[in-house]
Image (tube, rainbow, N blue to C red):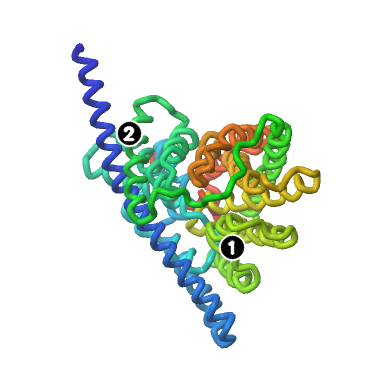
Amino acid sequence: MNGEEEKERRQGLFYLLEGAVCGLLAGSLAVGYRLVLEGAGVLLDLGLEMGRTHLWFLPLWFALLMALAFLVYRLTRWAPEIKGGGVPRVMGELDGDFDAPWLRTVLAKFLGGTLCAVAGLSLGRAGPSVQLGAMAGKGLSLLGKRERQERRLMLTCGAAAGIAATFNAPFAGILFALEALRRDFRPRMLTPCMAAAVCADYVASAPFGLTPLFRFSLNGPMGWRMGPFLVLLGAFLGVLGALYSKGVKIGQGLYGKISWEPGRLLIPFLAAGVLGFWVPEALGSGAGLMGLLVEGLPVLSVLLVLLAAKTALSLLSFCSGAPGGLFLPVLSMGALWGGVWAYLMAGLGLSGDWTASWVILAMGGFFAAVVRAPLTAAVLCLEMTGSFSQLLAVAMVCLTAQAVSGLLGMPPIYRRLRRQLDTGKKGLTNGSGTGKMKA
């Protein structure tokens, strides 16, 4: 072994160890955030129960929601980089265009996301966990006085760890970091990201175990005869995903016309307050909805009401600039569309035994259509549900959905939000706002 090969071997081992340390740190942050959000959900349930049983509490509840909205607004003024899910900001950091203070970002994102969860906004925890993990990696590299290349590597490792700890899905974390963030699958990137994701999943296994988040009762893998229906489902979800992405763009534009900045946050906070007493299942990230679907499919009329309420609140929440992501809301909307598809298939005479399979496939397909990352979408759904027997089916649906969404002219939503950051559009929302840009 010559000197160059020995140097490369030592460097690879060092990167692997750095990735592992980053995964432990970022995973701990993501797990802590996940636990705090679960506590925030308990507070939300208590507030809604008080409002249902004591009418005198209703004005106090809405006053609290307005106060929470103002607190989140003040946080976004102090730390503009926490607006939205955080994934576009991480992309900007990787590109060298943004340089957010890592500790301030971690503190503000953690608190802002918690306040939004107490109010019941339809926002996910994965995007914030990606940003928290990336900032943990950045802090680690800065404290170690690493070079720019190693800092970018630690940002990527932290992002992978955030997804892994959030969903108990280490392979989805690796794929998201490399497919959606970096688009780089070289071994030099893959190995430390894998170490980070595995270590983060190890940390998450202590409080949450190693079982999938949602365990559906399946009827075995779909046979080759179902292929045409899988392609049709993928095309259907591709159109829906493109429409949702278009809705996000329109919603951001409408919010941008509101000159009073606190008012942009008041809208989703008050909307969550109203829906909480009408369709409480629509509140939060969507994990509750997924649990409902695991137990069994509601009647079609109820399913459509849930879908309409979840979509409306998700758009209001995500487009407002509140700290929170779109992973779980998009996955839960996809699952609801899968329920609608199951009713459609039953109407055509197909056996209802495939209901759970349609729900799982639609989760992945809708996510793939919105994010345009089919590998991540497929693996994430399989890891979240433990339904690896559906590998071929979910791959077909995800690939078709992302292709149809692309044919309709919809760019990957995170790429569009990343470009929006560069334009410096004032007053917009997720993935936008002011931030320190490097010259």
Quarter that holds the N terminus? top left
Q: Given the image, on which type of amino acid does mark 2 rest?
A: Pro
Q: Position of residue 167 (x, y in %)?
A: 45, 48
Q: Which mark is residue 235?
A: none
Residue identified by numbered label 1 = 259
**Vertical comparison of 97 with 47: above or below:** above
Q: Quadrant of residue 20?
A: top left
Would you place residue 233 above or below residue 8 in this image? below
Would residue 174 be found to the left or right of residue 260 on screen? left
The residue at 59%/32% (across/down) is 392
Q: Residue under circle 2?
A: 192
- The residue sitting at the bottom extreme is 56
Q: Who's the residue at 54% across and 84% down the image? A: 57
On screen, residue 228 above or below 413? above
- In whole angstroms, how far apart are the C-alphas of marks 2 and 1? 45 Å
The residue located at (48%, 33%) in the rendering is 179
First in residue order: circle 2 vs circle 1: 2
Measured as percent of width and height from the top left, residue 420 is found at 55, 44
Q: Is residue 295 left or right of residue 300?
A: left
Q: Residues within 10 Å of mark 1 (few under 14, many from 20)?
A: few
Task: In this rendered view, identify the residue nearer to me: 278 or 229.
Answer: 229
Q: Amino acid at mark 1?
A: Ser
- The local secondary structure at tag 2 comes to helix
Please provide percent x and percent y for residue 341. 72, 47
Of 62 and 35, which appears nearest the observer? Answer: 35
Specify whether residue 423 is in view.
no
Q: Is residue 117 visible?
A: yes
Q: Residue at x 32, y 42 (%)?
A: 199
- Mark 1: secondary structure: loop
Dividing the picture into quarters, in which one does residue 13 lie? top left
